[in-house]
Image: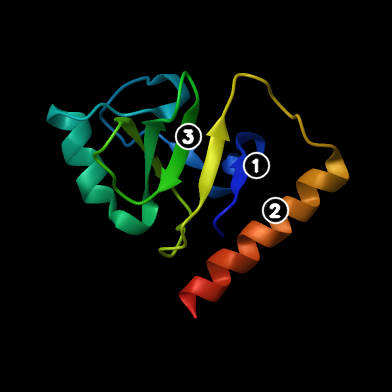
C-alpha cells in the first residue's frame, strides 16, 4: 500500500515498549543505546520508524529507516515487509467507525498478501 493511512488504526499492530526500558511516550524508542539495541532485537518485521516529513508532519513507516528518523516503535504484530505509512497526529479517532473498519480490512489484506 503506497497511500498514507491515518494513525488511529496503527494500534492494530499493538505497539509496546520492550521490557526493561521503562515508560516511553507512545512507545517511541530513541536511536541510541539500550533503545537502539531493543529496536534491533525486535526484528525488522516488528519495527517501525517515526520520521519527519515536509514541514511539521510526522509519519510512522514500516521497517527501519535512517533518513529523517526521529525514533522507532516496536509492535507485537508483524507488518510482513509491507510498505505502510501512517500519518501521525495528536487527534484520535478521526475516522468514522465504518471508515476505520474499512481501512483496517485494507491494511490487514496488504500485510497478508505480503506474507504469502
Residue beneath disc 2: 104
Task: State left or right for residue 41 relative to residue 12.
Answer: left
**Numbered disc total:** 3
Q: Residue furthest front?
A: 54
Q: Secondary structure at mark 1?
A: helix
Where 78 sits versus 37, above or below? below
Instruction: Return the disc, 3 or 1, that comes first in the chain's sequence.
Output: 1
- Is 97 above or below relative to 93? below
The crowd level at tag 1 (other Cα within 10 Å; few <14, some 14-19, many 20+) is some
Which labelled disc corresponds to residue 26? none
- Asked if 84 appears above or below 59 in the picture, the reply is below
Residue 40 horizontal side relative to residue 13, left or right? left
Give how far across and how far down residue 84 sits, in percent.
50, 52
C-alpha separation, residue under disc 2 versus residue under disc 1: 7 Å
State the image coordinates of residue 49 (x, y, percent, origin top left): 36, 39
Q: Position of residue 104 (x, y in %)?
A: 70, 53
Q: Can you name the residue that lies furthest to the left here?
A: 33
Say what secondary structure mark 3 lies in: strand
Q: Is residue 1 above or below residue 17?
A: below
Callout 2 touching callout 1 (CB < 8 Å): yes
- Residue depicted at x 21% and y 47%: 40
Query: Which element type, helix, strand or loop, lies under badge 2?
Result: helix
Residue at mark 3: 59
Q: Residue furthest bottom?
A: 116
Q: Residue 61: horizontal and vertical position, in percent?
A: 44, 44
Query: Which comes before the other along the chain, label 2 or label 1?
Result: 1
Q: Which residue bears the numbered disc 1?
A: 9
Picture quadrant of residue 112:
bottom right
**Answer yes or no: do the residues labelled 2 and 3 have beta carbons within 8 Å?**
no
Amino acid at each position: 500500500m503506497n497511500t498514507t493511512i491515518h494513525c488511529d488504526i496503527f494500534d492494530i499492530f499493538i505497539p509496546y515498549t520492550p521490557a526493561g526500558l521503562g515508560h516511553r511516550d507512545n512507545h517511541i524508542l530513541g536511536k541510541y543505546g539500550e533503545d537502539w539495541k531493543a529496536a534491533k532485537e525486535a526484528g525488522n518485521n516488528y519495527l517501525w520508524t517515526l520520521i519527519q516529513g515536509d514541514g511539521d508532519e510526522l509519519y510512522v513507516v514500516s521497517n527501519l529507516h535512517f533518513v529523517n528518523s526521529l525514533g522507532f516503535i516496536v509492535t507485537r504484530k508483524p507488518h510482513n515487509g509491507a510498505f505502510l505509512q501512517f500519518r501521525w497526529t495528536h487527534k484520535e479517532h478521526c475516522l468514522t467507525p465504518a471508515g476505520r473498519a474499512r481501512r483496517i480490512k485494507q491494511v490487514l489484506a496488504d500485510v497478508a498478501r505480503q506474507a504469502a
